[in-house]
Image: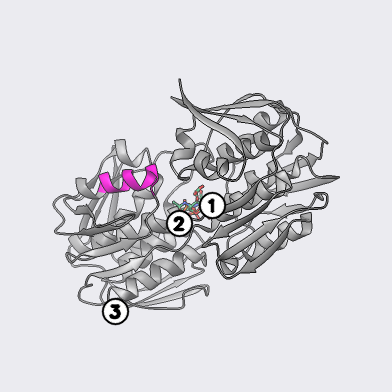
Amino acid sequence: MDRFIIRGGRRLTGEIEIGGAKNSGLKLMVAGLLTSERLVLSNVPGIADIKTMRDLLVGLGITVEDAGPRTLSIGGEIGSVEAPYDIVSKMRASILVLGPLLARAREAKVSLPGGCAIGTRPVDMHLKGLETLGAEIRLENGYINATAPDGLKGDRIILPFASVGATENLLMAATLAKGRTHIVNAAREPEISDLVHCLNAMGAQITGEGSGTLVIDGVEKLHGAHYAVMPDRIECGTYACAAGITGGDLLFVGGRADDLGAVIRTLEETGVEVVEEARGLRVRRSGTLQGVDIMTEPYPGFPTDMQAQFMAMLSVAEGASMITETIFENRFMHVPELNRMGARVNVHGRSAIIRGVPKLSGAPVMATDLRASFSLILAGLAAEGETQLSRIYHLDRGYEGVDRKLAACGADIARVSD
Ligand code: EPZ
């Protein structure tokens, strides 16, 4: 397995190209199930989860072809309706094929996704919503067996929580249902809007994106389209913390301020400056980092996917900070590792108290999940001495070319194979 070796203390300056969004690209690939015509997606990130999704779609009989740099052409007839455990257990987003398979093939057999490092992550809202649209669902031997022999029928769905995945599954299913569907208390993340724009480009009739209610008028069939995946706002926010923790000055080419409102406001509260420029977002820090309080919430609140990265940065801020994680029940796995580097973080239930320290010290640490892995890189960039980060396959799932991008801005980081 590969490791990163980081020697801290360098101030990062330069430019970082922001890639296509993982949490949009994966869903747009699934949208390719909704038509036999070609959906051509550009600006697709080169990350492990995209490869896993490609394997899943090919297993369903769909063709996924390279059509240029970071461009995939997806389409064809559905040959199988089974999403097997070995793929679903690797990537939870696989559950999103359930709605499209029901809509297009009127049946689906999808493994129940297991839990993961950050929580149990049930899919009850996905299943209840699909039953509201007329699906019959039975859970057997760890699989979801779903059928809709007469096709899906539009209806009104009220989500108890603005679940991103449930919104996406139900949205895609409703595009081919008979009649109108309302999804009330729908998630409002920018990645949902990206999916709505792509589906509408394919001939779907969806309004209300960005609001809490999506209205979908089902159509007979969807057609092919060309669509560019939005830039990855979490990748941009993650590297912004690298500028913050090293007192650097970085330009994120392709970064969009519109998608990062709460993150930008919080960065500015800590003393990090964010400036919109023609080519993207510039983030720099010249003064001291100040402690702040953060509560993760559904969009447009502070994103849970940025929590670990901010904790690393705040561990060397002046004063104390409190971070409350309201979305996932176990998303503080990075805390023990940060503390091994000299941070002073105490977890009390869903809140963590961070007392800023003047310096972190490099140490051998282990990645546990995607965003926690990056928080340890950020700590290593600021720490005195050498940090060795193992199990970086967690990182490869969602970040492309981390060592290349950071080294180009002056970081002393190398990827080595065990
Ligand atoms: C998506 O996960 C993202 N993943 C996550 O990013 C992100 O953290 C999350 O949305 C919240 O923004 C992808 O887009 C691939 P949810 P998802 O459904 O759809 C509970 C990353 O690091 N819930 O909004 O699974 C659930 O347990 C990943 O890129 C139910 O109880 O998130 C969780 O506590 C991590 N029942 C909360 O809702 C359900 O049926 C939020 O889940 C569905 C969800």
Which residue is disc 3 drawn over? 179
Closest to the observer, 86 or 392? 392
| Residue 49 inside the magenta-drawn segment | yes
Mark 2 and mark 1 lie on one chain; the one further toward the N terminus is 2
Q: Quadrant of residue 150?
A: bottom left
Indicate the amino acid at tag 3.
Gly
Q: Residues within 10 Å of mark 2 (few under 14, many from 20)?
A: many
Residue 127 seen in the figure: no
In the image, residue 131 above or below residue 154? above
Instruction: Tell me the number on the disc at residue 21.
Output: 2
Point out residue 131 in the picture as x, y percentages from the top left corner: 33, 61
* Quadrant in which the N terminus appears: top left
How far apart are labels 1 and 3 at the CA level?
38 Å
Residue 347 appears left or right of 173: right
Distance of mark 2 from mark 3, alpha carbons? 31 Å
Give x and y (percent) for residue 387.
63, 27
Is residue 152 positioned above or below 105 on the image? below
- The crowd level at tag 3 (other Cα within 10 Å; few <14, some 14-19, many 20+) is some
Q: Secondary structure at mark 2?
A: loop
The answer to whether residue 133 is left or right of residue 168 is left
Residue 385, relative to residue 243: is it above or below? above
Disc number lying in front (1 or 3): 1
Q: Which residues are magenta?
A: 46-56
Task: Tell me which label, 1 or 3, sits earlier in the chain.
Answer: 3
Which residue has dot 1 on it? Answer: 235
Q: Is residue 151 left or right of residue 402?
A: left
Give the amino acid type for the residue marked by disc 1 in the picture: Glu
